[in-house]
Image (tube, helix red, strand yellow):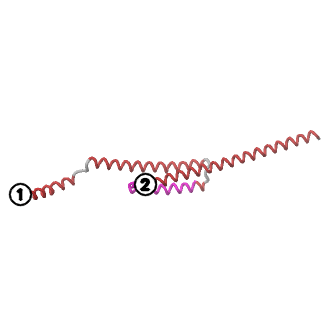
Amino acid sequence: MSKILNSSLSIATICAVALPIALSLPASAEDSVMTEFRNSLKVANSKRFRERIENSKKQVESATSKNWLSSDQAEQYNQECARVSQMEQDVAAKGFPKEETDPLEQAVTALNQKITTGIASAAAAKTQTASEEEKDAQNTSAKSNKSVKKHKKHRRQA
C-alpha cells in the first residue's frame, strides 16, 4: 500500500511541478511556424483583395476619362467598389475565415465582371453611334456632292 501511495505522490508531485513549467514554455516550433503561415496567408489575402478592388476603381476612372462611362454609371460602379471594399475590411478584421472569404471572392469577381461588361457595352454603343454618325456624314457628303454636280450641270446648260 505504501508503494502505491509513494508512487501516487510521486506522480502528483511531478504533475504539480511539471505542469506549470510546461505551460510557461513558449509554443512549439511547429505551432509557431503554423501561426506565422496563417498570418502570412491573411496578409496575402488582404493584399490580393485590396489590389483587385483598387484595379476595379482604376478601370472605372479610366473608362470615365475616356468617356466610355457616364458620370452616373461611374458613380454606380464606385458605390459598388465601396461596398465590396467595406466587405473586405470586415472579413479582414475577422481574420479571413473561409465561410466569409468565399462570398468576398465571389463579390470581387462579380464586381470586376460587372465593370468590364459595362465598359464593353458602353464602348460598343459609342462605337456603333460613331459608326452611324460617320455613315450619316458620308450620306450627307454624297448628297451634297450630287447637289453640287446638279448645280454645275444646270449652270452649264444655262
Which residue is painted at 69% across and 49% down in the image? 129
Magenta span of residues? 74-101
Q: Residues within 10 Å of mark 2 (few under 14, many from 20)?
A: some
The mark lying in front, picked from 1 and 2, is 1
Q: What amino acid type should be assigned to the residue bearing mark 2?
A: Thr
Which residue shows up at 82% across the image and 44% down it?
Answer: 144
Residue lying farthest left? 2
Disc 1 element: helix
Q: Position of residue 26 (x, y in %)?
A: 24, 50
Determine which residue is flagged by label 1.
3
The residue carrying mark 2 is 101
Where is residue 89? Give x, y as percent: 43, 55
Q: Residues within 10 Å of mark 1 (few under 14, many from 20)?
A: few
Residue 20 covered by magenta stretch: no
At label 1, the amino acid type is: Lys
Depth check, front residue: 120 or 56: 120
Q: Residue at x 6, y 57 (%)?
A: 3
Prevailing SS of the magenta stretch:
helix
The residue tagged with tag 2: helix, strand or loop?
helix
